Amino acid sequence: MAKPFRFGVGLQAGRRQQSVQEWARRVEDLGYDVALVADHLYTTAPFPMLTAIAAATSSLRVGTFVLNAGFYRPALLAREAATLRDLSEGRFELGLGAGYVKEEFEQAELEFPSARRRVEWLAHVTDHIRAELPDVPVMIAGNGDRLLTLAARRADIVGLTGGAPITAEADPLAERVAFLRSAAGDRFDELELNLAITAVPSDSSGRPDLTLARHYLPQLSDDELLALPSVLAGSPRDIADTLRGYRETYGISYISVQQYHTEAFAKVIAELR
């Protein structure tokens, strides 16, 4: 049986409590399920922001998308997570990643380990959280084999990047889902699969703004960017059909978008609810 859709939206900016909480209430009213905050040194601190959002809403869940596990000691992170779980009355979801921006490790005066060691540390943090806070849903997001193996075996939610074009010859997203299925075994049907969207049309043209997608994948042409599963084009009804196809084909039922997609993507949510 297909899982019900869930929709998340990420807050990119905002340092005034009033504006953040007004946005959160608007997000809740528009039908989003989760408000998400990233974990980069150039953005706001995730836990205070999510606490402010949770205090302003009643049903909206809050989550990290995603914490850089390399920035945290497990016991200290568990304390932060437990506090937010309690203050939000159980509406907190903990998203974790291995960390990938070398410059941020350096700015934080931390060693930048190899990819293998970063995933090993992520596993260590995840194990501690699962043992101490079994009632907090855990997302692990990424694309590599080691990380997806960890996510398949220990996460509740798996964040897929959809970072390569789908063509007539190749479907990298299908390959990643197949790898995840193999690694998860009997657990696969319990996993919720997430896809982070990088482009959504903001007007009636149906053509998305490719700025963010191009930032992450500057080597791709516009046509190749439009072939990314994380880039959505067409009318709200067209996009709703695309997402139904993602759920049927890949099992993806949790879709997250960026803050500046909030209003435009709400029309898609209305088509799917």
Image (spheres, helix red, strand yellow):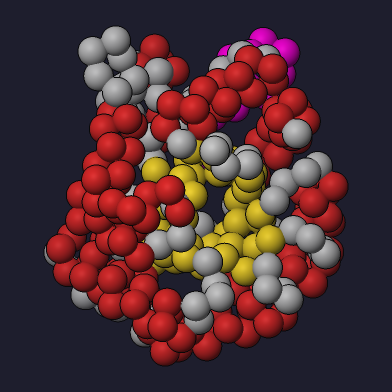
**The stretch drawn in magenta includes residue 258:** no
Choose top left, top right, bottom left or bottom right for residue 108.
bottom left
- Quarter of the picture containing the N terminus is top right
Q: Is residue 260 above or below residue 204?
A: below
Q: Residue at x 83, y 64 (%)?
A: 58
Q: Which residues are magenta?
A: 196-208
Q: Residue at x 50, y 78 (%)?
A: 134
Q: Is residue 147 above or below residue 248?
A: below
Seen in the image, is 175 located left or right of residue 193? left
Q: Is residue 261 above or below residue 56?
A: above
- Rendered location of residue 192, percent (x, y): 49, 49
- Rendered location of residue 9, percent (x, y): 64, 47
Choose top left, top right, bottom left or bottom right for residue 139.
bottom left
Seen in the image, is 112 located left or right of residue 258? left
Can residue 84 be seen here? The reply is yes
Q: Residue at x 64, y 77 (%)?
A: 85
The residue closer to the viewer here, 227 or 45, is 227
- Rendered location of residue 161, percent (x, y): 38, 41
Q: Residue at x 70, y 51 (%)?
A: 33
- Quarter of the picture containing the C terminus is top right
Q: Is most of the magenta stretch helix, strand or loop? A: loop
Q: Is residue 11 above or below residue 175?
A: below
**The stretch drawn in magenta includes residue 207:** yes
